Image (cartoon, coloured by chain):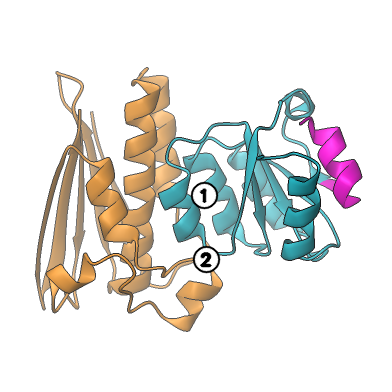
Amino acid sequence: MRKTYQIEKDNYEDAGQASRDIKMTLKTLGLDPKVLKRVSIACYEAEINLVIHSDGGVITFEIDDEGVVHLSFDDVGPGIPDIELAMTPGYSTASKKAREFGFGAGMGLDNMKNCASTFDIQSSKEGTHLKMSFV
Amino acid sequence: MKLQEILDIVDGRELYIDSPHVYEIDFQDAFGTDLMSDALCHLRDADETELLITGLANMQIFHTANTLDLAAILIVRGKTIDEHMIQGAKMSNVSVFVTNYTMYETCGRLYEKGLGK
């Protein structure tokens, strides 16, 4: 099974809907609740990041024949200048608006990494590409 | 602690009930924050027995509760939610309550009575 979702920059109203749909799909498929929780948290954090920090992008969700969940987040920029710094708990460049919606604590990437079984992030000015898998 | 007791302690009232089951849950703890990022970090192992207390009143509180498998949100400072937001709560399967007390006093009252001790 494979699904994709378009995510718009600064669309705080709809932010979280893709993650909720992915969670519902995995719940219906009978995924282990503990794995489902980790997927849900990481997916929602990453979706929020697309809304807050990117110029828009795509979420791709896939579950393979062995039940491994794969999530990809591919945006069109502006990129993360220093990934190591961005991964530091507490470091945030979130806007005032993002904070008003309850985000921007600087814990997102670290939280995602802790939830995922594999975590890979590449970034340039042309875009950021985040891949996570969950076993 | 059952929800009715929680509401009595903080003079709370219902804004939206997703399921009557919420009144049967024995709440063990609560987490008070306006930062959903913090809730997503600290409540990774939470379940429906955790109450989310917040001063925020927007769609993201429902998405956060849904992500964390929480059943109830208590909004402080008397903020209410409109019909559009009630639809958001419904989609997220979360019940919503409100108290006029501040975050500080809400948490203090509930902790004093044993929630989370």
Q: Which chain is cyan?
A: B
Q: Is residue B60 magenta?
A: no
Mark number displayed over residue B64? 1
Q: Looking at the image, which residue is at 72% across and 63% down?
A: B103
Q: Chain of mark 1?
A: B
Q: Looking at the image, which residue is at 56% across and 44% down?
A: B65
Q: Is residue B10 magenta?
A: yes
Above or below, B77 relative to B19: below
**Residue B38 seen from this side:** yes
The answer to whether the residue labelled 1 contacts the one labelled 2, judged by CB atoms less than 8 Å apart, is: yes
* Direction from residue B7 to residue B116 in the image, left or right: left
Q: Looking at the image, which residue is at 42% across and 21% down?
A: A28
Of the 4 image quadrants, the one containing the N terminus of chain B is top right
Extent of the magenta region = B1-14
Determine the CA span between mark 1 and mark 2. Answer: 10 Å
Q: Looking at the image, which residue is at 76% across and 55% down?
A: B108
Above or below, A15 relative to B92: below
* Colour chain A is painted in: orange
Residue B21 in the image: state x and y as whole percent.
74, 23
Q: Amino acid at mark 2?
A: Gly
Residues packed near mark 2 inside 10 Å, few (<14), some (14 to 19) or many (20 plus): many
Q: Which residue is mark 2?
A: A102
**Quadrant of the rendered structure where residue A90 is?**
bottom left
Residues packed near mark 1 inside 10 Å, few (<14), some (14 to 19) or many (20 plus): many
Q: Chain of mark 2?
A: A
